[in-house]
Image (tube, rainbow, N blue to C red):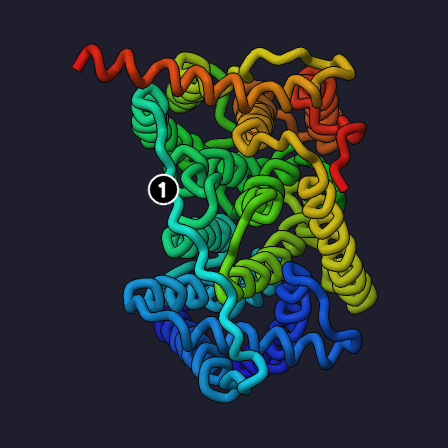
């Protein structure tokens, strides 16, 4: 794929995007009978507890760290038939171990405990949401007291 | 050069019409005929477009549409790469030679998918509660890991690449775990948002998401049916190519039905946890990445059947140990 080939396809995509967007916007302008406006969706801002936000930040940081050895493994594809004790293979194995270690360490791979396999699992899922709500509610005064 | 563009121009209206029809299923049906439904859907989208007041929202939606259409216009390259042979390698100065062509193309498609989905999710982050998962970086980890696992099997023309055994088995048979992980991670945002019980999507976002899903299928299918690095370099035969094209068309239809059924299934489940689905996909992607690494680098396997054995045993382990924890198949709590 040479550069002008890519440029041609890119311009084709841009042209298609604009054509599709404005054809729909102008060509199919709404008729008066469609004019009843659907109710404006309520603005809902997700309120996470502080631990939840910290966990998400932690996982985002770890995800960036995990992607680095993953890209190293992609580079290692060109060395597929090297011997297993070749230094490159050892490095890749180290990267593999790092990926697993980081994923386990941060708890990305652990499922929340639940009645697994039992017929009551659906019931447990029902009960889960009020329980988490209560914990959030009980947690917030503590935070306020601390602050 | 001009032939793929012509095919694309002919194919685009069909995909657009199909996406309009699919977008209409999110709303209570008022019309009965196919044509009337499509017209109604386009009017609805146009109405919602004209009501977009926020300029940044408009730009983000356009960018998301551009990402999907750029993927769509580069899809023929994957088809030509999958039917290319070593001796046809490009000699002139090229941005992307055929040596690592499939690898780079799939990476580009993955990045375009992430960029498009994130920019689409930003515009509706206040309406859907579970969307904050998609906006986080760690959500996209399974997709990248599955990409790294799958592309170990695409043909690259290096002196160190796997040689030895020859087979014409497809990639989905040689590396089923990675292919399944790639498929699940790719369609993950679509399933998550559509399975959300109290979602209020705008018609524009809904339509763009359907269009992205359809174009994603066009990317996934040549990957699933593509030849692996163990494919023998034989002469082209017209019959084989026609057969492959037929199988690809059939696979697109099968995958489309699977996705739509999965969407309805997840919608009807009451206690659906998006994070659980994400963790399952992450497990699958990690297992498939390990399988690719162990098979090629540690064991140095050149026998395709050994790859099949290893991957299917890992897939069975994943299904046996992890799926029961997910409690996905509990259909007893169907809410009507």
Residue B172: percent from left, percent from top: 70, 41
Would residue A118 appear left or right of B177 to someone viewing this image? right
Helix, strand or loop for disc 1? loop
**Where on the picture, by quarter, is residue B140?**
top left
Residue B82: percent from left, percent from top: 62, 57
- With respect to residue A37, does B186 lie above or below? above
Would residue B74 appear left or right of B224 to someone viewing this image? left
> What residue is rendered at 38% in x and 56% in y?
B123
Residue B77: percent from left, percent from top: 54, 64
Screen quadrant of the C terminus of chain B: top right
Q: Is residue A5 visible?
A: no
- With respect to residue B213, does B296 lie above or below? above
> What residue is rendered at 50% in x and 39% in y?
B143
Instruction: Out of A89 and B8, give the one closest to the viewer.
Output: B8
> What residue is rendered at 65% in x and 56% in y?
B222
- With respect to residue B299, does B170 lie above or below? below
Q: Circle 1 is placed at which residue position?
A: A45
């Amino acid at each position: 794929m040479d550069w002008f080939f890519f440029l041609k396809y890119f311009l084709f995509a841009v042209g298609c995007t604009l054509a599709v967007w404005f054809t729909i916007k102008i060509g199919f302008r709404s008729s008066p009978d469609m004019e009843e406006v659907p109710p404006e969706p309520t603005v809902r801002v997700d309120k996470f507890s502080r631990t939840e936000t910290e966990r998400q930040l932690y996982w985002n940081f770890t995800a960036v760290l995990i992607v680095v050895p993953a890209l190293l493994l992609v580079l290692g594809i060109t060395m597929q038939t090297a011997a297993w004790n070749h230094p490159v293979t050892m490095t890749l194995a180290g990267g593999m171990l790092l990926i697993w270690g980081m994923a386990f360490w941060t708890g990305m791979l652990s499922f929340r405990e639940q009645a697994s396999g039992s017929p009551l699992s659906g019931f447990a899922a029902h009960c889960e949401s009020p329980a988490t709500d209560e914990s959030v509610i009980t947690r917030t005064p503590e935070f306020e007291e601390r602050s | 050069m001009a032939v793929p563009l012509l095919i694309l121009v002919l194919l685009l209206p069909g995909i657009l019409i199909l996406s309009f029809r699919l977008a209409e299923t999110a709303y209570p049906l008022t019309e009965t005929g196919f044509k009337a439904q499509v017209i109604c859907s386009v009017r609805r989208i146009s109405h919602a477009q004209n009501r977009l007041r926020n300029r940044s929202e408009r730009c983000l939606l356009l960018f998301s549409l551009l990402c999907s259409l750029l993927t769509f216009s580069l899809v023929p390259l994957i088809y030509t790469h999958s039917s290319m042979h070593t001796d046809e390698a490009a000699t002139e100065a090229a941005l992307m030679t055929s040596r690592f062509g499939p690898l780079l193309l799939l990476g580009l498609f993955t990045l375009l998918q992430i960029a498009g989905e994130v920019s689409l999710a930003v515009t509706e982050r206040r309406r859907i509660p579970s969307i904050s998962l998609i906006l986080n970086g760690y959500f996209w980890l399974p997709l990248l890991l599955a990409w790294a696992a799958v592309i170990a099997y695409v043909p690259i023309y290096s002196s160190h690449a796997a040689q030895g055994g020859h087979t014409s088995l497809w990639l989905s048979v040689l590396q089923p775990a990675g292919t399944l992980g790639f498929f699940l991670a790719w369609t993950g945002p679509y399933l998550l948002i559509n399975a959300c019980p109290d979602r209020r999507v705008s018609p524009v976002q809904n339509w763009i998401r359907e269009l992205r899903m359809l174009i994603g299928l066009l990317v996934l299918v040549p990957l699933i049916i593509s030849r692996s690095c163990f494919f023998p370099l034989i002469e082209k035969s017209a019959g084989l190519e026609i057969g492959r094209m037929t199988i690809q068309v059939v696979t697109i239809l099968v995958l489309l039905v699977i996705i739509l059924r999965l969407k309805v299934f997840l919608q009807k489940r009451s206690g659906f946890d998006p994070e659980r689905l994400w963790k399952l996909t992450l497990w699958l992607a990690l297992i498939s990445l390990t399988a690719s690494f162990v098979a090629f680098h540690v064991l140095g396997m050149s026998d395709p059947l050994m790859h099949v054995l290893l991957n299917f045993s890992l897939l069975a382990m994943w299904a046996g140990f992890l799926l029961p924890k997910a409690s996905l198949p509990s259909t007893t709590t169907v809410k009507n």
